[in-house]
Image (tube, rainbow, N blue to C red):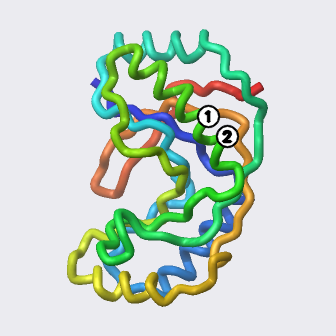
């Protein structure tokens, strides 16, 4: 069994700009937040969880064989939010504003193939975003919530990125954080 998910990783320039914004956030927010390593910045397109080797191979074949009529495209991360809500900040994200509809097309392509194969369909609506950090300590919630409630600049993050491919990734959880390994990728046209 392997732990798998589909993702699109940031390009080098976007990664650098988002890393700068994360450093700024670290100065503004209390310690104890688990920040994502910039090398791991990505948009999760579909999380699969534990998958058997045979099923993973079949999934790869189906994704490679199906045509996705979509050219590579640009999109923009804009602003900062918390999930699930500003009053219950568990995850700090930057949402995708411009270009989000095309990311949803890629998500739907993957989702349809996965559900046809018997993977569980996503119950929540897909909202393209990039996770910057996770609030693990409940004692920090009020301070984090206050910061985000008072944050008024909608352009505090305003970073352009580009999707040329998406990847099926294997995730190995370690005490130092997740380690990702690309299983395969599919280029957009």
User: Of 180 and 91, which appears nearest the observer?
Assistant: 91
For the C terminus, the image quarter is: top right
Q: Please tell me the numbered disc located at residue 105.
A: 1
Q: Going 56% across and 32% down the picture, which residue do you hit?
A: 167
Q: In the rendered view, would you say 123 is above or below 33?
A: above
Residue 57 position within the rendered picture, expressed as x and y whole percent measured from the top left: 43, 13
User: Of 119 and 139, which appears nearest the observer?
Assistant: 119
Residue 7 position within the rendered picture, expressed as x and y whole percent measured from the top left: 53, 39
Using the numbered discs, state the Cα–Cα distance from disc 1 to disc 2 in whole angstroms: 5 Å
Q: Residues within 10 Å of mark 1 (few under 14, many from 20)?
A: some
Q: Going 70% across and 56% down the picture, which residue do you hit?
A: 98
Q: Is residue 93 left or right of residue 173?
A: right
Q: Are marks 1 and 2 in contact (CB under 8 Å)?
A: yes
Residue named by callout 2 = 102
Residue 92 position within the rendered picture, expressed as x and y whole percent measured from the top left: 44, 68
Q: Going 38% across and 14% down the picture, which residue do you hit?
A: 117
* Image-quadrant location for residue 24: bottom right
Q: Going 64% across and 49% down the picture, which residue do you hit?
A: 100
Helix, strand or loop under label 2: helix
Q: Residues within 10 Å of mark 2 (few under 14, many from 20)?
A: some
Q: In the rendered view, would you say 80 is above or below 27?
A: above
């Amino acid at each position: 069994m392997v732990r798998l998910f589909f993702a699109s990783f940031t390009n080098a320039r976007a990664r650098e700009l988002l890393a700068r914004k994360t450093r700024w956030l670290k100065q503004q927010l209390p310690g104890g937040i688990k920040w994502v390593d910039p090398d791991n910045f990505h948009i999760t397109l579909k999380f699969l969880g534990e998958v058997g080797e045979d099923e993973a191979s079949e999934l790869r074949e189906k994704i490679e064989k199906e045509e996705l009529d979509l050219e590579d495209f640009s999109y923009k991360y804009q602003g900062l939010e918390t999930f699930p809500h500003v009053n219950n900040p568990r995850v700090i994200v930057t949402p995708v504003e411009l270009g989000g509809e095309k990311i949803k097309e890629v998500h739907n392509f993957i989702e349809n193939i996965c559900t046809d194969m018997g993977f569980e369909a996503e119950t929540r609506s897909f909202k393209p975003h990039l996770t910057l950090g996770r609030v693990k300590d409940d004692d920090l919630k009020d301070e984090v919530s206050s910061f985000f409630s008072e944050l008024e600049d909608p352009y505090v993050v305003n970073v352009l990125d580009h999707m040329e491919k998406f990847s099926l990734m294997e995730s190995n959880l370690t005490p130092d954080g997740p380690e990702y390994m690309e299983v395969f990728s599919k280029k957009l046209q």
